Image: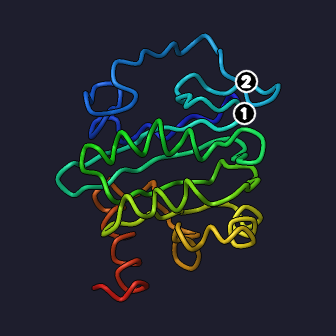
Amino acid sequence: MHNIEPFYNWRHFYMAEEDENSPFYERTYNEFYFTNAIYDYLIHPQWDEIGSPTLYVKLLSVDYNLHYAIIELIGEWNDTINNDIMFLKRDVADVLIENGIKKFILIGENVLNFHPDGDDYYNEWFEDVEDGWIAAINFQEHVLNEFRQSNIDYYINFGGELDSIAWRTDDPVELYKRVEMILSRRLGSG
């Protein structure tokens, strides 16, 4: 797992550690010293900790004018033991929401599995972005099945075209517009 880096080709557009409104403002990274692990597997030092021992993130892009954030995730999303949604909501989403973000794109290719435990934080996040949305793209099918079984699909949009977006070829605004178009058709608001 230590070879899986967060996507870095957008760093000329945005770097969370340089954004004073980011929850990761002024973070420093050591490219050679690996300190974080998911269970016994070291992960690349560019991933950001959010308080969970199993779920890490990278804030890839934020646009305060278009009101969106793109977040890449890695690890095990475990609400049952670690209450990971609490960390993601309180330590990342809330900070961004306070600064006008109301549309979230979660990239989940590297999320290994999901363990649910209630929907309070999902409901709160959903209500906090009342005229926005939360979209999950490229999560693995077994993770999406767990989302469905837990009724997380009421709060987070996924499925269909969102499950196989070739997002690395886009710039952040193109990805946002593509997800926005899919959700506009789906939600009947466009």
Answer with left or right where residue 67 lies relative to residue 184: left
**SS at circle 2:** strand
Relative image position of residue 62 (x, y in whole percent): 30, 45
- Give above or below for 40 relative to 153: above
Q: Residue beneath label 1, please?
A: 1
**Label tally:** 2
Residue in front for this viewpoint, 119 or 14: 119
Q: Quadrant of residue 131?
A: bottom left
**SS at circle 1:** loop
Q: Name the residue located 56 percent from the left edge and 28 percent from the top edge.
A: 49
Answer with left or right where residue 28 lies relative to residue 2: left
Residue in front for this viewpoint, 141 or 145: 145
Give the spatial CA distance, label 1 vs label 2: 6 Å
Q: Name the residue located 53 percent from the left edge and 63 percent from the top edge.
A: 137
Residue in front for this viewpoint, 57 or 177: 57
Q: Name the residue located 57 percent from the left edge and 79 percent from the top edge.
A: 160
Residues at circles 1 and 2 in contact by the CB criterion of under 8 Å: yes
Relative image position of residue 33 (x, y in whole percent): 61, 10
Q: What residue type is labelled 1?
A: Met
Q: Residue beneath label 2, please?
A: 42
- Give above or below for 30 relative to 76: above
Scheme of colours in the image: rainbow
Relative image position of residue 157 (x, y in whole percent): 51, 71
List the single residue furthest toward the right. 40
Q: Quadrant of residue 119?
A: bottom right
Q: Which amino acid does label 2 sit on?
A: Leu
Tell me the quadrant of the picture where the N terminus can be found: top right
